[in-house]
Image (tube, grey):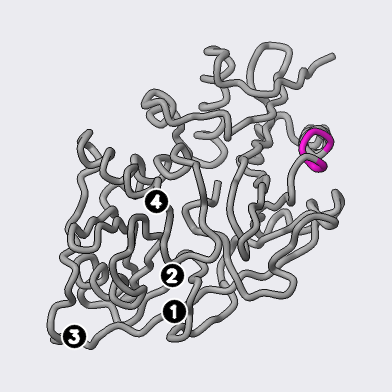
Amino acid sequence: MDYTLVKQVRDNAPLRESFFALARRVFGLSFEEWHRAGWWTDRYVPYTMVYRDGSAAANVSVNRIDTVWRGEALRLVQLGTVMTAPEHRGKGLARSLMEAVLDDWGRTCDGVYLYANDTVLEFYPKFGFVPAREHVCTLPLPARGAAPAEGGFARLHMDTQAGRALLLRCYERSNPFSALPMLDNPGLLMFYCSGFLKDCVYYSSAYDLACVATEEDGVFTCCDFFGTGRCTLEQAVCAAASAASPGAARAELGFTPASAAACARAPVQGDDHLFVLAGGSNIFAEDRVMLPLLSHA
């Protein structure tokens, strides 16, 4: 046979490097530093088709995501890093990988989901996935020139051991404002916060609260909070925006707030489309919620 399925490439150095090269080639993703820093845990399991020459030809990764919804624990599986090298496309490798993943994981969790771009919207329904709609919450921010918000958020330096340790200490306490938090997944958190979001992490000693946030086109996106939450959600958002994006007019939450009286909700717009495996847990069918932005794999 030309191809062999390998379930987890982390501890096979040559194959791991080939997997890294495929991710760079297809998505421009770099996993090397994340792996060297020790953040690759058993929660991330690539299913990789290996060509006869030992190279990674195609991949579908399993990401185990734990959360809580309405007081009940949910163990979800998110599929990601779905990719095939150009020279190996059209040979059914992605289909074989999807079938293997769903056979192993489809009945061992509460639900399976994934995000797809516009080019593959007809592919995933072949395996029983159905479209789902997430909703984002927005909050108004104080007008420019208003008194500085309390809270005193300042940037955490992710290149330092102290900065990483403080973020992880806060992360252990989860998001005090979230109805659907990502739990016990520091590896995925640090994929973001030790990588392209490493300059987007803030901390308030007054609130003992960490915030991961970005700003674009006047919109402050609060990806997540972690910590004790010695304040209201509105206070935390205003204080974090004051430090990270003082000119922003509104804030978008990258998570589903537990209390959203002051929030406006709208369907999520963008190029990534959520699909949920039919027959499992589908909290999006009746509730206007979204999975945390930092849980996207």
Q: Earlier in the sequence, mark 4 or mark 3?
A: 3
Residue annotated with mark 4: 173
Residue 90, above or below 16: below
Q: Earlier in the sequence, mark 2 or mark 1?
A: 1
Residue type for callout 2: Leu
Please rate how many residues cluster around mark 2, counting C-alpha atoms within 10 Å: few if below 14, some from 14 to 19, many from 20.
many
Q: Which residues are magenta?
A: 103-107
Residue 291, above or below 16: below
Q: Position of residue 146 (x, y in %)?
A: 15, 86
Q: CA distance from mark 4 to mark 3?
A: 33 Å
**Residue 106 among those drawn in magenta:** yes
Which mark, residue 138? 1
Q: CA distance from mark 2 to mark 1?
A: 6 Å
Q: Earlier in the sequence, mark 4 or mark 2?
A: 4
* 205 relative position to 101: left or right: left
Q: What residue do we see at 34% from left, 55% from top?
A: 227
Mark 4 or 2, which is nearer the eye? 4
Classify residue 169 by image quadrant. top left
Q: Position of residue 187 (x, y in %)?
A: 46, 37
**Residue 186 among those drawn in magenta:** no
Secondary structure category for the residue under label 2: strand
Residue annotated with mark 2: 253
Please rate how many residues cluster around mark 1, counting C-alpha atoms within 10 Å: few if below 14, some from 14 to 19, many from 20.
many
Q: CA distance from mark 3 to mark 2?
A: 20 Å
Residue 151, above or below 25: below
